Image (cartoon, rainbow, N blue to C red):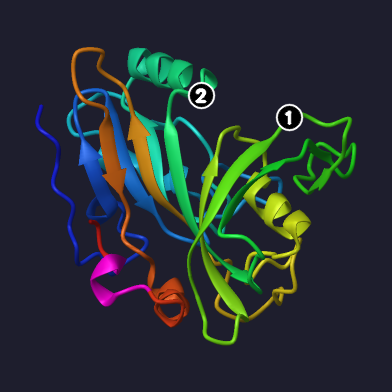
Amino acid sequence: MSPHPANPHRTDPQHIGVRLLYRDALLLVIDKPAGMPVHPGPKGGETLTDHLDALRFGLPRRPEAVHRLDRDTSGCLALGRHAKALARLNRLFAGRETEKVYWALVEGTPPTEEGRIDLPLMRRSDDPRSWWMKADPAGDPALTHWRILGCTGDGSSTWLELRPVTGRTHQLRVHCAALGFPIRGDAIYGSGPRTSGPGLQLHARRLVLPLYPKRQPIAVEAPVPAHMRAGLEACGMAAGDAEMS
C-alpha cells in the first residue's frame, strides 16, 4: 500500500484522522497533539487511545502505539496496525534501530554548538504512579546527542535538535535541565508554570524506521505545532520550515 499523504491543514487536534502523516499495511504515523496522553493514567480522562478506532481502515482491531510521547509533547508517534506489525516495530525500537529527532526551545544558550549528554536516569520515587525522574549514577543508561539550530539575539532562548539514543521516561527533559538549559514550559524540571503559559516546547519532529529490509527506511516528519512557532521563528526558523521539509 502506498504512503498516505500528509494533510498540511490540520487544525482540530481531536480529529485524529486529519493528523495522519503516514500509512501502509503495517504502520501508521500520526502527529500527536500536545496536551493529550497516549495511554490512560491513574486519574482517567481522555487519551489518544480513545480515538484510534477511527484509524482501523478496514482492519478488525484498532492500531496500538509502539512507543510513548509525554502528554505535553507533540509530533511523530508510530502505531502498529496488527499484532505482527507491533512485534516487528517493537523489535526496531528495542534494538535502537530507529532514528528519533526532536526540536526543543530551551532557556538560555549552551556554550558549545553541539554535544552529548550521557547521564543515567531513575525514578524519583518508588511510587509506581509517579513518572518523575532524576539523574542518578545508579539509574538506567541514557544518552542524548544535541546541537544548536538557532537562538534569539539576546541568548535567552535556543532552538535545539535533540537525538535520543535511549528512550528513558522524560529523558530529554531531564537531560536538558541537567545541562543547565531546561526546556521552556517544563513545569517539572524547568521554570514553566503549571496552569498557564504556552506549554512544553518539545516536538517529535522526525521519525525514521527501517521497517522493510529491501526498501529505504521510512522517514516521516511532523509540522511544528502552533504553540511553538513564534518561539522557533524568534530563534531563526524560517516560516517554511514549520511544515514538513
Q: Residue furthest toward the left?
A: 2
The residue drawn where x is 50% and y is 34% is 67
Quadrant for the N terminus in the image: top left
Mark 1 Cα shell of 10 Å, populated few (<14), some (14-19), many (≥20): some
Is 85 a magenta residue?
no
Q: Is residue 45 left or right of residue 81?
A: right
Quadrant of residue 123 in the image? top right
Q: Amino acid at mark 1?
A: Pro
Magenta segment, principal secondary structure? helix
Q: Which image quadrant: the C terminus?
A: bottom left
Q: Position of residue 182 (x, y in %)?
A: 69, 64
The residue labelled by disc 2 is 96
Q: Residues in magenta?
A: 237-242
Please rate how many residues cluster around mark 2, counting C-alpha atoms within 10 Å: few if below 14, some from 14 to 19, many from 20: some
Q: Is residue 106 left or right of residue 28?
A: right
Q: Report x, y in % for residue 35.
A: 53, 62
Measured as percent of width and height from the top left, residue 34 is found at 48, 61
Residue at point 26%, 27% (across, down): 217
Q: Residue furthest bottom?
A: 154
Marks 1/2: CA–CA distance: 13 Å
Up-down: is 89 above or below 241?
above
Q: Among all residues in the image, which is located at the extreme front?
A: 112
Q: Is the residue 136 above or below the residue 73 in the image?
A: above
Residue nearer the viewer, 217 or 62: 217
At numbered mark 2, what does the secondary structure look like: helix, strand or loop?
A: loop
Magenta stretch holds residue 241: yes
Q: Are marks 1 and 2 in contact (CB under 8 Å)?
A: no
Is 133 positioned to the left or the right of 164 in the image? right
Residue drawn at x 65%, y 65% is 110
